[in-house]
Amino acid sequence: MALADRKSSDVFNKNTGGSKDAKSIDTEKETEIRDAFNNGDHIADTGKLENLAPVLYAIQQLTEDIEELRRYITAEVGDGAQGPQGPAGAKGDTGDTGAAGADGARGADGARGPAGADGADGADGTTPTMTSLNGSSLPTRRGSSGTLWNNRGIVAIS
């Protein structure tokens, strides 16, 4: 089960600069609040205690609940590491093989396409003879099918 969204907001914060808001305090003010609490000022001042007693009682109960949760999680759940794996269960039965599906009908053969036109004759003399073939006289771009060309110093056939 996932943790629910937080319902409470901060009582105060230590935001500064552009993120400072109405609940922002500086370090000195935080120290003053902490020291007053640690010194028991809220208990010693009977006027404060009388006004704050119900709230302080509720906060004390919440603190005890949180401590009980911390104790339970530490004792019962531990550090969150996975415990040892239990033995494997028995393997289930293999189900029956399903029926084979029927073969589909064969489609009719398509009509034969028309014959292609004859290609044009190649230009005479564009491919050098084998005796003068060194690659430097060949074009550097691929030509029509069956012609030689210079592919970065390697003679290739298009």
Image (cartoon, grey):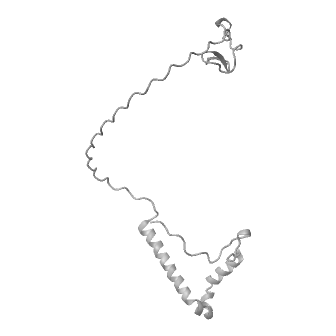
Q: Nearer the viewer, residue 80 or 158?
A: 158
The reply, left or right, for residue 136 in relation to residue 82 is right
- Does 58 sit left or right of 38 as displayed? left
In depth, the one of 143 and 88 nearer the eye is: 143
- Residue at 26%, 49% in the rendered image: 93
- Where is residue 62? Give x, y as percent: 51, 80
Q: Residue at x 65, y 19 (%)?
A: 143
Spot occupied by residue 107 in the image (x, y as percentages of width and height): 37, 32
Give the mark count: 0
Query: Is the residue 89 above or below the residue 58 in the image?
Result: above
Q: Residue furthest top?
A: 131
**Vertical comparison of 119 with 17: above or below:** above
Q: Would you identify the image quadrant in which residue 96 lies?
A: top left
Residue 20: image location, x then y, percent: 71, 72
User: Measuring 66% from the left and 81% from the top, which residue is drawn there?
Assistant: 33
Residue sitting at x 49%, y 68%: 3
Residue at the farthest right position: 17
Could you tell me which quadrant the N terminus lies in? bottom left
Pick whichever, 138 or 72, lies toward us. 138
Q: Is residue 144 left or right of residue 60?
A: right
Rendering coords of residue 158 (x, y %): 61, 19
Pick the residue in front: 80 or 1. Answer: 1
